Image (cartoon, rainbow, N blue to C red):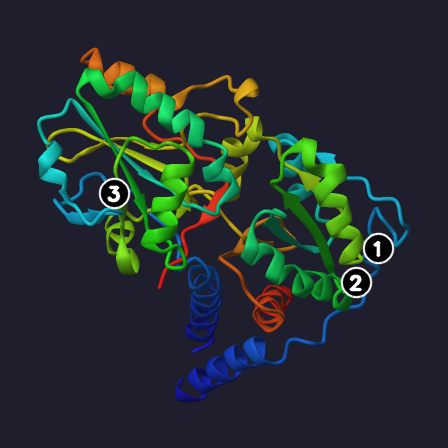
């Protein structure tokens, strides 16, 4: 009886500890490895399907924002990346999933920063949920099977003069050279995507 | 055996519900209430040292930035937590993710406005990935985030997004009573 009581007590302690920890980790995120096709409209009302870009050598999906200072620190670099890779069969799609940023806001922001890549409005953050994207800017590079080849940051500094690791650039170069991406997952602090 | 079962249930409820009766210990910090704000940079080794050096206290870490609207909104509740737990087995630090060039112009005025007396460290971009990995391998880096380590330096709570005073209090109390 005494042994059973001790075992029961130990079981309780383990249960209590697990409950406290996992309860707090309920919202942690895991990386997705593949996404399904989706259709979203850009700020001009034109529909874009992911399958429209399946013949590209790589599809760069960029979760971005109009009001996030971290995302905005990369406006010029995003446009430069588009310019560098547009003729190398790399497609670029911006996605805005923030509930408080309207189609009109996105259109004005794109115009202000002379973005030439499409920016799609993800109403009700459905696509952000499918990617499990949580931050802006957050980049996913897909192959023609919509498998994630690279996920993470554009580079390692908001201040362009301090960049020492051009992570997205490196990943795209490796993909275009038929190599496996060396650094497939990177991270940086950013703004939380504001969900409904 | 049935009696033992009910004993465990009662013990569980007590541990979760009655959490204000903690040992009183001094939890003064570096800034000690003066008007000089010293925002220092910190890397992974520095943070690991703080996490490991518990001296019987739990550690509450809030990750924030002045550019992050939900961080700014929850910050007064973080300050209130710091004040209310000052005399408990409790240590608080915050990790700021503004740019170092914004310390004087943005971070310190914000700290003054909020009458902050706890240590504030700034994480440089070059260290951000390692810092994110240290704090939680499943975390993308979206802020705000608040983390609680127990007095053995083991992470017990990882709270993604903004939370209020009562949520923080409940989480702290559950770790203090472990």
Tell me the number on the disc at residue B28: 1
Q: Is residue A19 visible?
A: yes
Q: Is residue A70 above or below residue A14?
A: above
Q: 10 Å neighbourhood of mark 2: few (<14), some, or many (≥20)?
A: some
Q: In this image, A21 relative to A41: left or right?
A: right
Q: Nearer the viewer, mark 3 or mark 1?
A: 3
- The subunit letter for the residue under badge 1 reads B
User: Do labels 2 and 1 touch, CB within 8 Å?
Assistant: yes
Q: Is residue B116 visible?
A: no
Q: Quadrant location of residue B174?
A: bottom right
Tell me the number on the disc at residue B159: none
| Residue that carries the numbered disc 3 in the rendered image | A32
Residue A165: percent from the left, percent from the top? 46, 19
Q: Secondary structure at mark 2?
A: loop
Tell me the number on the disc at residue B86: 2
Q: CA distance from mark 2 to mark 1?
A: 7 Å
Q: Residue at the spot x=35%, y=52% of the render?
A: A104
Q: CA distance from mark 2 to mark 3?
A: 42 Å
User: Which of the pair A119/A185 is nearer the observer?
Assistant: A119
Q: In this image, A114 relative to A50: left or right?
A: right
């Amino acid at each position: 009886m005494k042994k059973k009581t001790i075992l029961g007590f130990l079981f309780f302690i383990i249960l209590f500890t697990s409950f406290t920890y996992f309860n707090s980790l309920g919202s942690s995120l895991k990386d997705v490895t593949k996404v399904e096709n989706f259709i979203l409209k850009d700020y001009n009302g034109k529909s874009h399907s992911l399958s429209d870009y399946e013949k590209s050598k790589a599809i760069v999906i960029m979760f971005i924002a109009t009001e996030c200072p971290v995302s905005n620190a990369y406006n010029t670099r995003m446009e430069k990346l588009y310019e560098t890779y547009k003729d190398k069969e790399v497609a670029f799609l911006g996605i805005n999933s923030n509930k408080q940023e309207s189609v009109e806001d996105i259109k004005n922001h794109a115009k202000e920063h002379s973005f030439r890549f499409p920016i799609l409005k993800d109403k009700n953050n459905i696509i952000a949920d499918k990617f499990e994207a949580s931050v802006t800017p957050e980049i996913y590079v897909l192959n023609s099977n919509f498998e994630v080849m690279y996920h993470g940051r554009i580079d390692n500094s908001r201040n362009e003069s301090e960049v020492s690791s051009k992570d997205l650039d490196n990943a795209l170069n490796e993909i275009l050279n038929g190599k496996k991406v060396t650094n497939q997952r990177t991270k940086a602090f950013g703004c939380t995507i504001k969900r409904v | 055996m049935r009696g033992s079962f009910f004993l465990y249930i009662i013990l569980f409820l007590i541990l979760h519900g009655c959490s204000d009766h903690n040992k009183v210990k001094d939890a003064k910090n570096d800034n000690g209430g003066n008007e000089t704000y010293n925002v220092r940079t910190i890397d992974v080794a520095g943070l690991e040292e703080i996490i490991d050096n518990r001296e019987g206290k739990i550690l509450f870490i809030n990750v924030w930035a002045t550019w992050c609207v939900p961080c700014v909104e929850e910050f007064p509740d973080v300050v209130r937590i710091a004040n209310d737990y000052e005399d408990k087995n409790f240590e608080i630090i915050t990790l700021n993710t503004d740019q170092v060039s914004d310390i004087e112009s943005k971070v310190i005025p914000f700290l003054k406005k909020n009458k902050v007396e706890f240590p504030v460290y700034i994480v440089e971009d070059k260290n951000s990935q390692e810092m994110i990995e240290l704090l939680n391998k499943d975390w993308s880096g979206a802020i705000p985030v608040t983390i609680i380590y127990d007095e053995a330096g083991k992470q017990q709570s990882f709270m993604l997004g903004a939370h209020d005073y009562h949520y923080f209090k409940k989480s702290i109390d559950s770790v203090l009573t472990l």
